[in-house]
């Protein structure tokens, strides 16, 4: 990860759950062979799989010393909280990691490298702070160039934040690569960058240049010879706080195909820790119309498949939910983590050949 193979200690103190520790879960699922331990003293003694359903037997430990004993040599911040600040109770662990000479990998909005105390600890210990959300220095305005690239550009879009847009894109990429399709995952958020070792966290880019940054990522992937470019979606078009980044991303990458993602059973958009406080999530068919309409303002796109996150449902209920979504939308629908991404990849391949 980030230039060398690591043994990561993932810091998720007090919040190592599937919904709270999204970054930790993504790294465990797709870079799990580089994780030595997860730090959460409230769940110490358990395994990652028992806490979040990913990571297998990776141990959950109480502190840095136990993580070091498991071979850890870098600390990764495992959450992406609203506001993006470092929880103050975590500061001692971050400083302690730097004093040990460990690198610290962070996707927070607050740049740890700009913190005088932590920067001094890094200099003293010889470690490095990687602030993955730092935007690129170049600021480009989108011009619609992504609409003219040869590969099929696919964007995952959602009914809300944290519904599986990154996971869906990665699972489709994995399935297409198995089929010898040159598919490329484009990371647009901090967790995706940790997994792919490249990308831009578009929600940290000034508003006028989000679409331009996204466009550049697509042009780069197309120039490298990809047949399918799978762009990680962000936010949600109906979210009162994050709709701006969603729309800018859509108009920057100019997708021809959209995969609609939804967390089955969630009926309200999450705008705060109070889960039922946000606007009601529209029906899937209404979401489809909204996304296709918004895309068409710059470049036409169609929803070609739906991806459901069925966490919390038993197998029969999950299959029933996927079947219902398929009937409602008239496109393939599945949970790619639970049932595999083959049907989603079929829809993408059909679009690439069409």
Image: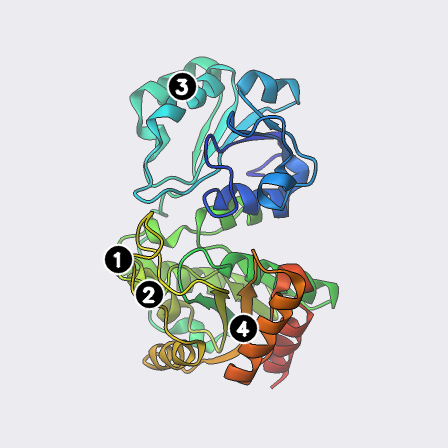
Front position among marks 1 and 3: 3
Query: Mark 2 or mark 4, which has the lower sequence index?
Result: 2
Q: Kindly identify the residue that appears in the image at 51 percent across and 83 percent down.
A: 328
Tag 2: Cα neighbours inside 10 Å, few (<14), some, or many (≥20)? many
Q: CA distance from mark 3 to mark 4?
A: 43 Å
Q: Nearer the viewer, residue 299 or 145?
A: 299
Disc assigned to residue 207: 1
Q: Which residue is mark 3?
A: 92
Tell me where residue 352 sits by quadrant: bottom right
Q: Are marks 2 and 3 in contact (CB under 8 Å)?
A: no
Q: Which residue is mark 4?
A: 306
Query: Contact, CB < 8 Å: mark 4 with mark 1?
Result: no
Image coords of residue 304 (percent x, y): 54, 79
- Asked if residue 164 shows in the view, the reply is yes
User: How far is the residue under mark 4 from the one under mark 1?
Assistant: 28 Å
Quarter of the image where one finds residue 74: top right
Dot in front, 2 or 3: 3
Horizontal arrangement in the rendering, residue 100 relative to residue 121 (left or right) = right
The quarter of the image holding the N terminus is top right
Residue 182: percent from left, percent from top: 66, 66
């Amino acid at each position: 990860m980030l230039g060398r193979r690591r043994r990561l200690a993932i810091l998720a103190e007090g919040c190592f759950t599937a919904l709270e520790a999204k970054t930790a879960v993504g790294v465990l699922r797709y870079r799990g062979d580089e994780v030595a331990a997860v730090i959460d003293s409230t769940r110490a003694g358990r395994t990652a799989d028992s806490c979040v359903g990913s990571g297998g037997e990776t141990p959950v430990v109480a502190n840095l010393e136990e993580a070091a004993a498991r071979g850890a040599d870098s600390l990764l911040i495992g959450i992406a909280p609203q506001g993006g600040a470092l929880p103050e109770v975590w500061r001692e662990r971050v400083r302690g990691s730097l004093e040990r000479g460990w690198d610290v990998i962070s996707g927070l909005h607050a740049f740890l490298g700009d913190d005088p105390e932590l920067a001094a600890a890094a200099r003293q210990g010889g470690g490095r702070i990687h602030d993955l959300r730092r935007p690129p220095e170049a600021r480009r305005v989108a011009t619609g160039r992504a609409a003219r690239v040869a590969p099929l550009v696919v964007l995952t879009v959602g009914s809300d934040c944290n519904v599986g847009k990154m996971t869906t894109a990665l699972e489709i990429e994995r399935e297409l690569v198995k089929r010898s399709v040159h598919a490329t995952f484009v990371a647009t958020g901090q967790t995706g960058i940790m997994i792919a070792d490249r990308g831009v966290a578009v929600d940290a880019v000034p508003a006028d240049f989000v679409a331009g940054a996204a466009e550049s990522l697509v042009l780069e992937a197309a120039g490298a010879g990809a047949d399918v470019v799978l762009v990680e979606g962000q936010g949600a078009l109906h979210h009162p706080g994050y709709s701006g980044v969603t729309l800018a991303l859509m108009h920057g990458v100019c997708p021809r195909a959209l995969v609609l993602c939804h967390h089955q059973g969630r009926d309200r958009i999450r705008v705060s820790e109070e889960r039922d406080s946000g606007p009601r999530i529209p029906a899937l068919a209404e979401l489809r119309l909204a996304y296709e309409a918004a895309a068409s303002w710059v470049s036409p796109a169609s929803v070609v498949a739906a991806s459901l996150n069925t966490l919390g449902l038993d197998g029969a209920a999950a299959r029933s939910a996927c079947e219902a979504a398929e009937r409602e939308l008239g496109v393939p629908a599945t949970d790619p983590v639970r049932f595999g991404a083959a049907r989603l990849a079929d829809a993408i391949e059909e679009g690439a050949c069409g």
